[in-house]
Amino acid sequence: MIAIIFGPPGVGKGTQSALLSEKLNILHISTGDILRKAIQNKTELGIKSSKYINAGELIPDELITGMVFDAIKNISSDNGFILDGYPRNIAQTEDLDKMLLTFSKKVDVVINIVLSDDEIIKRILGRRVCDLCGRVTHVDYGAQMDSDVCEVCGGELKTRTDDTAEAIRNRLKVYYSQTLPVLDHYRARSIVMDIDGNRGKENISADILAIFKE
Ligand code: ADP
């Protein structure tokens, strides 16, 4: 099964992809996570990417497409994978189709998580990420309001460098102008499933899981 978890920034794609990956035992490929790791490790990709990420811009396609191809080319299992954060524009969508065709595969399902801009901004501004284990928490919903220490691994909880009010505004603008058209591409193939993102993560996860069990 090749699935795309789709939706605006901050909607919970990472959280839902991780839950799904665990429950179905399939690989989760997050372009955002790969890029953040590259920045942390100061690789060439990381150095080239950080200015785009901090401004809330998309990273140039030629950097992203090679990175995704590297992530999927060694996948031997027939279990498939979950893509989170890719494709993010029409050129990437066409690149992905071509990539998958070389393996005689195609995207099977696109899970589109829907949420209002107001809620998105609230969520992103309250998001804290552990710099060691990557666990994501929220100052309003998590139990960690008074602490900067991750209760799972003891790492430091930080605000992502692109979770500023200005970068979020730009990320939403980029989402509506460049990323949303990707959905029309997949709607034409009748493989998009819309999911209400304005609920607790377990409820959302149960709905997504039900789609995979159909
Ligand atoms: P979010 O979905 O919360 O905005 P991600 O972790 O998916 O966050 O991505 C963070 C940033 O990484 C994006 O704003 C963008 O700069 C960059 N990025 C991630 N995936 C892509 C992609 N497919 N194409 C271009 N840039 C990307």
Image (tube, grey):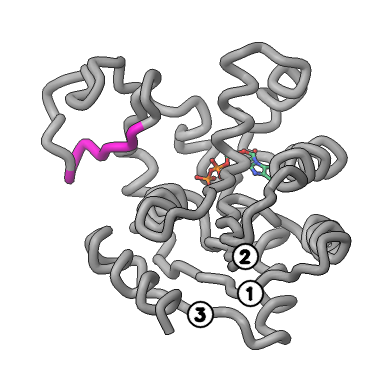
Q: Tell me if residue 138 is in the magenta stretch.
A: yes
Q: Amino acid at mark 2?
A: Ile
Q: Residue at x 79, y 59 (%)?
A: 96
Please tell me the numbered disc located at residue 108.
Answer: 1
The kind of secondary structure element at disc 2 is strand
N-terminal label among 3 and 1: 1
Residue 11 shows in the view? no
In the displayed structure image, the side of residue 190 where residue 105 appears, left or right:
right
Out of 177 and 192, give the one closest to the viewer: 192
SS at mark 3 in the image = strand
Between the C-alphas of marks 2 and 3, the distance is 14 Å
Task: Report which residue position mark 3 lands on.
Answer: 193
| Disc 2 target residue | 2
The crowd level at tag 2 (other Cα within 10 Å; few <14, some 14-19, many 20+) is some
Compared across the picture, whether 128 is left or right of 64 comes to left
- What range of the chain is rendered magenta? 135-141
Is residue 8 in view? yes
Instruction: Provide the secondary structure element on which disc 1 rests.
Output: loop
Image quarter of residue 142:
top left
Q: Is disc 1 in contact with disc 2, using a CB cutoff of under 8 Å?
A: yes
Can you name the residue that lies furthest to the front here? 77
Q: What residue appears at the point 24 percent right and 61 percent down from the top-left corner?
A: 202
